[in-house]
């Protein structure tokens, strides 16, 4: 309830929920992070190309949300932050918790 606000064009269109955060950005960040994390091209140039294409795609998704007036810029940034936080939680925090739990079992 603290972060709910209407979409930029909520008065002109049928609103499809609240504006903050952008779920498109959350999904884009998680998808690109997943692909970059688990798919490693053998050639370094392809790896750089992969990362550039991924970040470009994320940027285009964010810009499209703002251009189409489906979200404010802060909604897009909030979605990016939320997506990155979810990704880092899955890749860093959860494995640390599992390792600690396994160490306690072994002890």
Image (cartoon, rainbow, N blue to C red):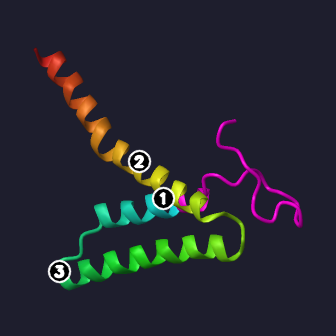
Residue 22 is covered by the magenta coloring: yes
Q: Residue at x 46, y 53 (%)?
A: 81
Q: Look at mark 1 in the image and give the residue it sits on.
A: 80
Q: Residue at x 66, y 37 (%)?
A: 2
Q: Residue at x 43, y 79 (%)?
A: 56
Counting residues from the N terminus, which is met first, the one under dot 2 or under dot 3?
3
Left/right of residue 88 with respect to residue 79 in the rendered view: left
Which segment did they paint magenta? 1-26
- Residue 45 % position (x, y): 21, 85
Q: Quadrant of the C terminus?
A: top left
Q: Look at mark 3 in the image and give the residue it sits on.
A: 44
Q: Element at badge 1? A: helix
- Residue 75 % position (x, y): 60, 58
Disc 1 and disc 3 in contact, CB within 8 angstroms: no
Q: Element at badge 3? A: helix
The relative height of residue 33 versus residue 5 in the rendered view (above or below) is below
């Amino acid at each position: 309830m603290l972060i709910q606000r209407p979409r930029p064009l909520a008065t002109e269109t049928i609103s499809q929920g609240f504006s903050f955060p952008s779920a498109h950005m959350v999904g884009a960040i998680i998808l690109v992070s997943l692909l970059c994390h688990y798919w490693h091209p053998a050639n370094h140039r392809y790896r750089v190309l992969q990362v550039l294409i991924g970040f470009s795609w994320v940027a285009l998704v964010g810009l499209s949300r703002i251009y189409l007036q489906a979200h404010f810029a802060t909604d897009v940034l909030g979605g990016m932050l939320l997506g990155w936080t979810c990704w880092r939680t899955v890749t860093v925090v959860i494995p640390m918790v599992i390792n600690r739990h396994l160490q306690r079992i072994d002890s």
